[in-house]
Image (cartoon, grey):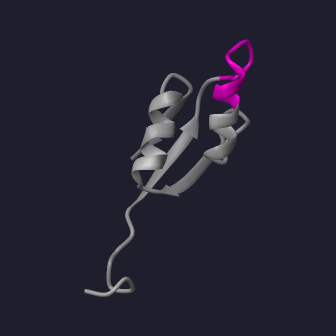
Amino acid sequence: MTNKEKTKATIVVRQVGSPLRRDARQSLYLKSLGLGKMNRTKELLDTPAVRGLITKVSHMVEVVE
């Protein structure tokens, strides 16, 4: 199987919490996910790195199905 034949799984993440009055690192995690404003949605590749970032800010984001 080549790389072109593999289907790349994606995950859709929506920001539901504000980074105000939180640790500065959490705001950076949101920016690295491509988020930053409320109710913004981003489709990302489903990789362990992205899953780790989602875990770090799980109280501010939700995975949309």
**Percent position of residue 11, x then y:** 44, 53
**Percent position of residue 59, x then y:** 51, 22
Q: Nearer the viewer, residue 48 or 44?
A: 48
Residue 35 image-quadrant placement? top right
The residue sitting at 74% across, 18% down in the picture is 20
Number of labels in the image equals: 0
Residue 46 image-quadrant placement? bottom left
Direction from residue 9 to residue 59 in the image, left or right = right
> Looking at the figure, which quarter contains the N terminus?
bottom left
Q: Magenta region's main secondary structure?
A: loop
Residues rendered magenta in the picture: 18-27
The residue sitting at 52% across, 56% down in the picture is 44
Q: Residue furthest top?
A: 21
Direction from residue 1 to residue 62 in the image, left or right = right
Direction from residue 33 to residue 11 in the image, left or right = left
The residue sitting at 69% across, 41% down in the picture is 31
**Percent position of residue 60, x then y:** 56, 26
Up the image or down, 43 lies above or below 50; here it is below
The residue sitting at 65% across, 45% down in the picture is 32
Q: Residue furthest left?
A: 1
Determine if the magenta segment contains residue 37: no
Determine if the magenta segment contains residue 24: yes
**Percent position of residue 3, x then y:** 37, 82
Question: Would you say residue 3 is visible in this rendering?
Answer: yes
Question: Would you say residue 39 is visible in this rendering?
Answer: no
Q: Nearer the viewer, residue 42 or 8?
A: 8
